[in-house]
Amino acid sequence: MSALTSSCLRARSDPDWPGHRLLVREPLRLDCGIDFGPFTIAYQTYGTLNPDRSNAILVCHALTGDQYVADPHPITGKPGWWETMVGPGLVLDTNRFFVICANVLGGCMGTTGPQDINPETGEPWALSFPVITVPDMVRAQKRLLDHLEIDSLFCVTGGSMGGMQVLQWAASYPQSVFAAVPIAAAARHSAQNIAFHEVGRQAIMADPDWSGGRYLSLGRRPVRGLAVARMAAHITYLSEAALHRKFGRNLQDRHAVTYGFDADFQVESYLRHQGSTFVDRFDANSYLYITRAMDYFDLAIEHGGSLPNAFKGTHSRFCIISFTSDWLFPTSESRELVHALNAVAANVSFVEIETDNGHDAFLLHEPELFETLRGFLTGCAEHRGLTRSW
Amino acid sequence: MAAPSSGTTRNCGDAEVRPADGAAGGLRRDLRLIAEMIDPGARVLDIGCGDGALLAHLARYKNVDGRGMELSQSGVNSCVGHGLSVIQGDADRDLEAYPNGAFDVVVLSQTLQATRQPRKVLETLVRIGRRAIVSFPNFGFWRIRLHLLFCGRMPVSHLLTHPWYETPNIHLCTIRDFVAMCDEIGVRVERSVTLDRHGQPYSLDPRGSLANLLAEQGVFVLSESRGKTNAAAQAEGRRV
């Protein structure tokens, strides 16, 4: 695992990173019962808010995503994670729409998270940071939108955990959501998904450098544990077919197996690379907190065990999108969501997109995803009375 | 709203159905007839909505609140890409979740014969819609009878385009069969129109032998009989 220890950048929020910061002074009542605050929300915006403030799209990022939707990542320098989707003339057309994306509460890219300093102790929060839930993340985002004086979002969209936030938005603030597009998401985290997250968390905690979560105070970082967590998780984002297509049993820079434990196979080398680059930009404790938030997500439980109740009386227009080869958030979970929305006669579209790119398909160039989303948003914009330009 | 490309196929389990002769404005004749039966501003569910031609027409000319359901993924993606609210699903599996009376009109056009449980589907249609409009090819049509009589082979027509071994139309019926089933399950026939080969309406009694012989397809407006509505609502307790 030597490759994994070579790079040891501290993933810590940096005031020089580009983008906006909002200091929320009024404490937020979290699901765990704690009044948390003041805290900071780091966010990016693209495009211009129209005079009647009706063209805002909130993009919610996934577990290891961030607010840099269409900007280079300040640590890795890589293009924004949805750069192909958000921009002038693109599907989330910044000539028409005002696109907002905020780092989630508990994250490590500028919004307050466990790596930040607890003002009461002067030490990083680490495990004394309160457990965050998806509803908490959404409550924090609502504060941001109140600050921006946006009462009603034209659209909320996002994939995976971003899709969970979309659903939470639609359930918690239906009057603020004109259109909701959860992609590759579900109304609850499945047992299998919780199981994979637990593997990741245990890998982090088993790293001696994790030090009970106090690694930052001790000048260490559990990069090996975090890398293993990422490697395991990354497998779940792909599909067997895609792994076979990309790597098969091909060997890495060699003609024969070495009868040892080097990365003989390309797929091993690929995963090690994924793990080692991830630790440069992500905080291990943030990973623990955010995976926990996903595990706790169950929209029906909040509404007396009935998923339709979460959407009762909604006037939002929904577009549910799933991918055929996504076994992490399979189409069956999206269909359950569709049935729940049908049960309250909500306005819902549901598209399953054929691809072998697995769960990660929402981040990749999937022409049908782009076409569907563009058409849906165009239709919604007409219903909303949004003219083409202002 | 951009209309989906006109003149393309409508998936009715019978993917190759072309717009009938005499179709105008890009809408198939029987769909135009159905469109005329729908009041402006109605809440409509079109099951087997194909490329969304009817929904687009209704949205444009009748300001309906339209939803669609379609089996073929390409049809769904095309509809949603054109701004229509359509879900991927099928009539057998995905109608149950809708509450009673969720729609003013539920349309099932040229699809009933491709469902696994047409009787159950029909009962569900009149439960979730105040009215259901159902169109289907009449297997009692004289050409079909003659084809079978003289050729001795399973009929293939412009409404039934597939050979027997790959047809999705697994529950074909005649107009009399259909009316008999409606009577049996207490579904009220509010109105019925029979169409000739060119999609022109006949003024024939749908219960008569002549309609069963001369009509190539039937279009029926159905509703749940009043007694059944109350009983069903009580039994199911499903009203939301």
Image: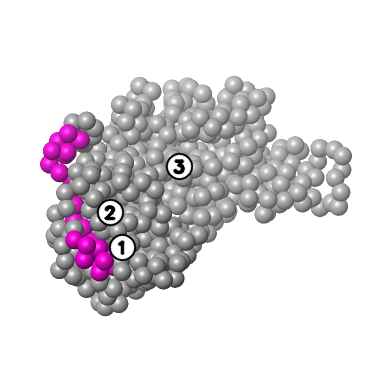
Which residue bears the numbered disc 1? B140
Where residue A220 appears, as percent x and y from the top left, is 64, 30
Q: Residue visible at 28% across and 54% down?
A: B177
Q: Give the residue furthest to the front.
A: B150
Q: Is residue A49 left or right of residue B64?
A: right
- Judged by depth in the image, the label closer to the viewer, 1 or 3, is 1
Where residue B162 appears, as percent x and y from the top left, is 45, 65
**Mark 3, other Cα within 10 Å: few <14 / some 14–19 / many ≥20:** few
Which residue bears the numbered disc 3? A332
Real-space CA distance between mark 2 and mark 3, rounded to the nearest whole angstrom? 36 Å
The front one of A314 and A252 is: A314
Real-space CA distance between mark 2 and mark 1, rounded to the nearest whole angstrom? 9 Å
* Residue kind at label 2, given as amino acid type: Asp
Residue B14 in sight in this render? yes
**Mark 1, other Cα within 10 Å: few <14 / some 14–19 / many ≥20:** many
The segment highlighted magenta reads B208-233
In contact (CB < 8 Å): disc 2 and disc 3: no
Which residue bears the numbered disc 2? B177
* Residue kind at label 3, given as amino acid type: Ser
Both labels 1 and 3 in a single chain: no
Mark with earlier residue (2, 1): 1
The front one of A69 and A236 is: A236
* Disc 2 chain ID: B
Residue B228 among those drawn in magenta = yes
* Disc 3 chain ID: A
In contact (CB < 8 Å): disc 2 and disc 1: yes
